[in-house]
Amino acid sequence: MAQQIIIRSFVSSTWLDLKPERAAVEALLQKFRETKFIGMEHFGSREETTLQVSLVEVEKSDLYIGIIGGRFGSGITEAEYDRARARKLPCLIYFKGEAAIQPEGQDVEQAKIENLRRFKDNLRDPVHGHTITEFSGCHELASRLASDLHNWLFDRYLAPALSDAAKGNLRSERAIALSNDLQRLATINRELLAQVAKEQRLLDEQRRLALQAFYQLTYVVPNTLARFPGTARDRERVVRDNLKQLDRLFRLSGGAHDVLRELATNYRLLATILMEQKRLRQACAAFKKSAAYCVSLIKLQPNQALYHRDRAVSHLNAGTLLEQQGNPTAAGKEYLVGLESASRAAELDPQWSDLAQDASNRVNQLEGR
């Protein structure tokens, strides 16, 4: 580095879905005076095909940086990686998190979906693959790459130079340059980490606003529609749309507690709407799904009586539906879990004592048949 070594860094990815990520990586590499961004953005017009040009550029590169999103594309990215491996280039691989991939950034053809899955499996193969870094936004990708580049450049170029310095084989001007390199790399990483924190604060605010909207859709809209006959299907559609977006928000937020709570509530609401339509099997599945989310909530807050109560209600309702479908054995199992949860809720808050008694009665009645 102090010797002004230039590392040709080939950035490989699909194009349309990862333009912002490529731009962030190019901006980062420009901050390192030792690295040069090599990518399709600067290939220009040539006689060769895009694939041929890409492979030629890989041949001339010193480092391969792979960014994998939700598209396999034409297969050029995989071909670039294969050529890099054949040349034994060091590879830094980054996967965009599933929750951060927009629908338009995903393949729809089954063959391409399967090819992407196979390619990603090869990249993270425990024997022949790599340690994969996952990211959700451009700043996070740049920050993680900056840290990896710092470590890689240090190990490959700075460490040997420092070893020379320790042996007295390094001139003073080179030692000063090395020190400056280290300080500059640390500054770059601090700047990027600040951007990541800013990005996270923005995501938190977006989640808060989204949950306010979901509150209206969960409680106000279905209750209003329920006043009118024949609106069950409309209410079901609203709740299912809620669940789809909440599930995405849950993954984007890394399993945020408040989103988890809304998921449990919406699945119970969906179950009651399905019961109105006599769709008992689907209603039972929705109650079980709500109960599963309640288990996750209880793990986060073990002494929150309301979560134990909600779990009990979901299991007791599922048991009732199973009885109606002629499956008393499965119903009994649901009642027993419901009794356990209801009893715990009553221990934490006496207002749920009646629920615990109801659960006990159901278990006794079923066993007395």
Image (cartoon, grey):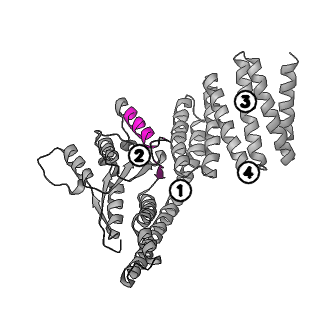
List the residue tagged with mark 2: 102
Marked residue nearer the N-terminal end (2 or 4):
2
Marked residue nearer the N-terminal end (1 or 2):
2
Q: Amino acid at mark 3?
A: Asn
Between the C-alphas of marks 2 and 4, the distance is 32 Å
Q: Is residue 160 magenta?
A: no
Horizontal and vertical percent position of residue 152 = 42, 62
Left/right of residue 358 with respect to residue 17 in the rendered view: right
Against 303, residue 188 (above or below) is below
**Along the line of sight, which residue is nearer the eye, 264 or 275?**
264
**Along the line of sight, which residue is nearer the eye, 286 or 35?**
35
**Label number found at residue 301:** 4
Between the C-alphas of marks 1 and 2, the distance is 19 Å
For label 2, the crowd category at 10 Å Cα-Cα, with few meaning under 14, some 14 to 19 and many 20 or more, is few
List the residue tagged with mark 3: 317
Q: Amino acid at mark 1?
A: Leu
**Along the line of sight, which residue is nearer the eye, 145 or 279?**
145
Marked residue nearer the N-terminal end (1 or 3):
1
**Label number found at residue 209:** 1
Left/right of residue 106 with respect to residue 245 in the rendered view: left
Q: Report the mark closest to the observer, 1 or 4.
A: 4
